[in-house]
Amino acid sequence: MTKNFQIDEFTWDSKKGLFKTVQKNGKTEMVRLCQYIDVIKRYKDVKDGLETLEITNGKVTVTEPGEILQTNKIQGLIGKSISFNSKNAADISYALQLKRDTLPITYITSSVGSIINDQGENNILLSDTYYPENYKGVQLSTSSQLKIEPFGSLKNWLQMFKDEVWGTPYLELATAIGISGLINSYLYNYGITHINSLFFHFVGDSSSGKTTSAMLALSTSGSPDKDERGLLKSWLATQNGIVQSLNNNFGLPITFDELSMSEITKMTPLIYSITEGSEKTRLNQDATAKPVRRWNTVIISTGEFSLLNNQHTAKNNGLNVRVIELNGPWTKCAKNSDEIKKSIKKNYGHILPEIANTLIKNDIEDIENDFNEHKNWFLNALKKDTSNTGTRMVDSYAVIMLSVQYLELIIEDEVPGLKLKANDIRQLIVDYHWNTVTNRSMHEKALEAIVQFVAKNRNNFSTGDKLVSNSDNYGLVNLISPTDDASQDFIKVDILKDSFDKMIEASNFQDGRVVINALKEAGSLIKTEKDRSYNRSRITDSDGNKQIIPFYSIKLDKDYALLLNLDLSKNHKVQNVSPIFMEGSKIQHIDTVTKNTETNIQKNARNIVKDRLARESSLDLFEGL
């Protein structure tokens, strides 16, 4: 702090106060106006042009709008530990205005992270601002209220990482995810990636350490606490509140904890909005458009159950390329989780500034080369996956591994020899892709939903070629063998068209036509009419009445036979089996099925459906199996 300086008739002395030089009785005198008071920083909002000032008395510093220097408003400082006699307000106001005019303007924005400046260059705004070398443009600073100032020490955070995280691939991956948002946003601004935001869902039970892993990711960048300024938020929020939590965030990780707390019933449009990096256009009461809130960062969700297979989430392939769902194991034990949380609450926000410095100081061509190396590796590793869904994930995988690479550079610079398990993390991603992404085709989701629907409503499906005279009859289910040998090639499910439409809606598919087309392309839809996706069948009910009814005819694997109460031992083209009936609160089979004839495939299918149905209904559909 400068001890003494003068502007016109005013003199500042850091120990004695603010003085004004006046002429009195022909003599020059210095009259003390008040204790020391000074304007030390000047900001202007790039959006609305409004000015903000930092004012200090040497002990207390306050941030106030520029209009505080008006004579009729300057007394507002008195209530903030900056004291002066109100009779001198006009002189103090003028003195501070003169000092303000000598200060350089720092332009502020509510945005945080990777920002394109007025010269088209990338600046990174965190608690400090990171500029390219020889930058001569407008000085920018963020006014974000998020708690991102480094706290504690990098040394202590690194010790925690070495003791509790190092060597555990899922924890190392979670840490890298924490910095992936800034890296992706930076690359996006150069047109290298086209990912509007990364979205991860950490799945695990209440003691698996999923929330601890998410907090670990947050600690790279700021406070992992669940408070107003912390980076940890709750799913117990409105859609508008969630969007506001992301607004103007271009690189800081944000976590929404515990999906089961959410009261949002239409999750699909929210996920699309989050990963698109903007909300839909909204109108004011006068029909003018409201400003659209935007972001590009990494969002982490946690929950005990899947987000993609949630009752409030539609089944479509668009979500599959927007959400990466990881299911631990996360922390090694309760003690491991406790030690991580204990440390990161006291030490956070040290890694992302190092990443920002790395990005700014390196040529973008070199960073792009690093990115492309990872991208090409995944393109080669996944070359047998010909699905469009799979190839669209490669950029996301490359950003993750680039984050792992740069995280290792930062850590090894501080702790030589501390290498991450990059190969193991890469293999986790490949396994995730083959086990999850490539298995998420629409027709497989549809077949799974059909099997669940038939199993859950088996008493509403007839077997044979006649519908039981029942207003709740959904269709027919039969084992089909086109020859007279002892084999049955497949199960044919004929679902009444209106029942199929109800199933599509109940299973959260957004468009039945997309489902039908997917079944048709996969060869699972049996068509007998050229111009229609459904068949029209002449049906005779149990009373002998005949009518033409539209069906969708679906082909299922015969391994579902036991699950659907069809007898594999009989050698007929269409086999009649005993129906099932309701008794009390249980659904029971009349005939007992021999368990030792069940194959592993059938057992797995039965367990999958049993597990899903158990969540939806209190009926024990599998009693006696």
Image: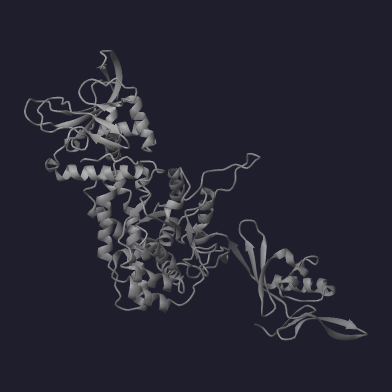
Name the quadrant containing residue 513: top left
Above or below: residue 292 compared with residue 513: below
Quadrant, the N terminus: bottom right
Q: Can residue 366 be seen in this view?
A: no
Q: Which quarter of the image is occupied by the C terminus?
A: top left
Residue drawn where x is 50% and y is 60% of the image: 115
Instruction: Answer yes or no: is residue 431 visible.
Output: yes
**Which residue does the image show at 85% across and 85% down from the upper left?**
29
Q: Where is residue 140 in the image (x, y as percent from the top left)?
A: 56, 65
**On the image, which quarter does residue 28 sit in?**
bottom right
Q: Nearer the viewer, residue 515 or 31?
A: 515
> Is 471 displayed left or right of 236 in the figure?
left
What's the residue at 66%, 40% (across, down)? 286
Is 255 above or below relative to 60?
above
What is the x, y in percent for residue 466?
Answer: 23, 20
> Total of numbered circles in the picture?
0
Residue 594 at x, y percent in the picture: 13, 39
The extreme left residue here reads 485
Q: Which residue lies furthest to the front in this view?
A: 584
Query: Percent position (x, y) of residue 183?
Result: 41, 61
475 left or right of 478 in image: right
Q: Which of 520 and 576 is in front in this view?
A: 576
**Residue at the outermost top position:** 545
In which image quadrant can residue 388 be found? top left
